[in-house]
Image (spheres, grey):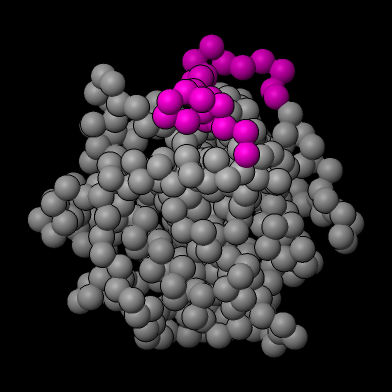
Amino acid sequence: MRPAIDMPGRDEPDEGLEPSWFVEAQRKPARLPASADRPAPLLFDQEHKPIGTSADWRRHRSALRGRWLEFLGEIPRPQAPPRPRVLQREELDGGVIRQRVVYEAEPGFPVEAYILEPASEATRKRPGVVVLHSTTPETIRQPAGLAGEAEKHIGLHLARRGYVAICPRCFLWEYGDRKDLRTAVDWLNRRHPGVTGMAKMLFDAGRALDVLAAWPGVDPSKMGAIGHSLGAKEALYLAAFDERVRAAVFSEGGIGLSYSNWEAPWYLGEAIRRPGFSLDHAQVMALVAPRSFLIVGGDSADGDACWPYVETTKPVWALEGAPTAVGLVNHRMGHAFPSLAQSRSYQWLDWWLAH
């Protein structure tokens, strides 16, 4: 798939060839920060016996998944997919249709989102991507190209590239006081006692994926997820726990539990800081395998310090027959999503979804 816009810093590979930087994304940085985490090896079962086959890993994976879901808490998922209602439709210069829609994630609780797609008719169904916004009062207007820095207009970028993108609003701004995120957490605690904020984000992102899968012209076998900062956190969990996500990009979300504010009440809560907490994000990353997962950092929340997470999970991807489907890119430009990050991220999605 060729992009329909001239992205700054773009270095498109030849048609059909794996981008050359994929090799670099698999390479250990020259020097790891002393503060880098050291996740425990994954290919050992609960009795500390080596895991040497894909079948053994799948059994262990199921147990890990269950432990994480028990910790997160679960929200019952309706069987019927949401039915989006179009509130506004406009055609943009550059051949993109942008629609503002509303649908019910949980029965009786609406969520707003933007859906962006190419205006031209396609000869075949298009890949779709859930685009999850960062922490901003503009929420969904940011990825839809209506507000904020142009570098984070990710949904618009992808639509111009040939994708259908859905940009849903995070529950923190949908059901609470936008000046105090804790009000949404209080709402969640009353509605779903014992359920973490991350579980609610996972549930809502899955419902957005439901909408995308049913959207006319989308190929439900070619769906992905991408997010920056807060949105990266949501993309990680969506990719880990929803196997419909075939490719994911995690930009500056802080992959290690110590790399960002994961203890915040709207994410995982203070339980992760208690002595003896035995879960970590290498386990969550490994749940994505053999589907693809790219970490993009700028030496702020993420960067070279993320390498141990890639190194720890790579044997799982190799065991699952997809050794090149996990990687790390460091643009070294801080907590941003600059042109290099855009180029790498979109090429990653192209390769795994549109190739």
Q: Position of residue 150 (x, y in %)?
A: 57, 56
User: Residue at 66% of width from left, 80% of height from top?
Assistant: 125
Q: Position of residue 4 (x, y in %)?
A: 74, 70
Q: Quadrant of the N terminus?
A: bottom right
Q: Is residue 168 left or right of residue 299?
A: left
Specify start and end residues of the magenta stretch as a single range.
28-53
Q: Position of residue 236 (x, y in %)?
A: 48, 47
Magenta stretch: helix, strand or loop mostly: loop
Q: Position of residue 333 (x, y in %)?
A: 61, 34
Q: Is residue 38 left or right of residue 316?
A: left
User: Residue at 33% of width from left, 76% of height from top?
Assistant: 79
> Of 94 and 3, which appears nearest the observer?
3
User: Residue at 62% of width from left, 33% of height from top?
Assistant: 52
User: Residue at 54% of width from left, 54% of height from top?
Assistant: 226
Q: Is residue 285 above or below residue 145?
A: above
> Of 334 and 19, which appears nearest the observer?
19
> What is the quadrant of residue 223 in the picture?
bottom right
